[in-house]
Image (cartoon, grey):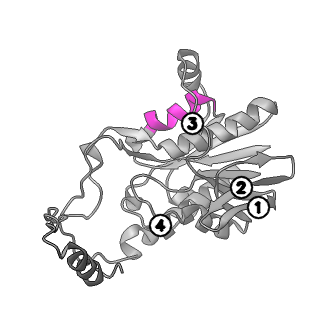
Amino acid sequence: MKIVVLIKEVPDTWGERRLSLETGLVERAASAPVLDEIDERAVEAALAFADAHPGTEVAVVAMAPASAVATIRKALAMGATSALHVVDDALRGADLLLTAEVLAAAIRRVGFDLVLAGNLSTDGGGGVVPAMVAEMLDAPQLTGLSTLEITDDAVSGDRVSDAGTMRVSAPLPAVVSITEAMPEGRFTTFKGIMAAKKKPFETVDAGDLGVAPEDAATARYIMLSVAERPPRQAGTKIVDEGDAGERLAAFLLAEGVA
């Protein structure tokens, strides 16, 4: 079986986050770049299956700047078999649709029986890329799974919602996204880090994947304005003078809560 895991380099969640007021893009140099934690969990899910099923190939796919090589190699050090890195300046600032198109093209190039991804990246939060990729690959999708079971010809798991827990399944090939309820990624070892340097690592651009240069991010959307987030305003303090209940109810009504 061949499992493809979509991974992403993101600014460290413990570091500073800010947008460039000129481009509207995240200033990625403001924090140390790291492999998104949710993607580590997706890699771990693939490796756990591979550990129990010899012969399973785990390939990671990333669309990221050239500087992300070290981050991608972390997934290889964890145990992934190979990596495909999409590097193209024309894709800088790509929107969700373009990102999904590029990733789907990369997955076709690699070949797959199962695609695993995190459900929500920490630097964007769109939460729709796995579903878009599934649509473009014409594959069934199981999104937001908190548990995962893989067999030779199917995949299944639990999706938790406000209404309850749903048990969902699909035949392979399929696309699956997982939540933070899945186990954390394993630690890398010195042996794994050294082995990662010798594993297949392919670098391609948009043209190699059949994505035309005119399909760059600037052709997909227009940014009208960018503004710095305003400072947080002081809240409303209600001191009980015998009418606190009435004033609180009025405040909630004005805020549209009640």
**What amino acid does circle 1 point to?**
Val
**What amino acid does circle 2 point to?**
Asp
Q: Quadrant of the C terminus?
A: bottom left
Which mark, residue 158?
Answer: 2
Q: Residue at x 55, y 39 (%)?
A: 40
Q: What stretch is highlighted in magenta?
A: 69-79
Find residue 83 and report its image quarter. Answer: top right
Label 1 to label 2, Cα distance in Å? 6 Å
Q: Is residue 143 above or below residue 74?
A: below
Q: Of the residues tagged 2 and 3, which is closer to the observer?
A: 2
Point out residue 112 in the picture as x, y percentages from the top left corner: 73, 51
Q: Of the residues tagged 1 and 4, which is closer to the observer?
A: 1
The mark that comes first in sequence, 2 or 3, is: 2
| Residue at the disc numbered 1 | 168
| Residue at the disc numbered 3 | 184
Find residue 78 and report its image quarter. Answer: top right
Label 3 to label 4, Cα distance in Å? 26 Å
Q: Is the residue under label 2 in contact with that under label 4 (CB below 8 Å)?
A: no
Name the one closer to the observer, 118 or 23. 118
Point out residue 70 in the picture as x, y percentages from the top left corner: 44, 33
For residue 215, side relative to residue 41 (left or right): left
Label 1 to label 4, Cα distance in Å? 25 Å
| Residue at the disc numbered 4 | 96
Label 4 to label 2, Cα distance in Å? 26 Å
**What amino acid does circle 3 point to?**
Glu
Q: Is the residue under label 4 in contact with that under label 1 (CB below 8 Å)?
A: no
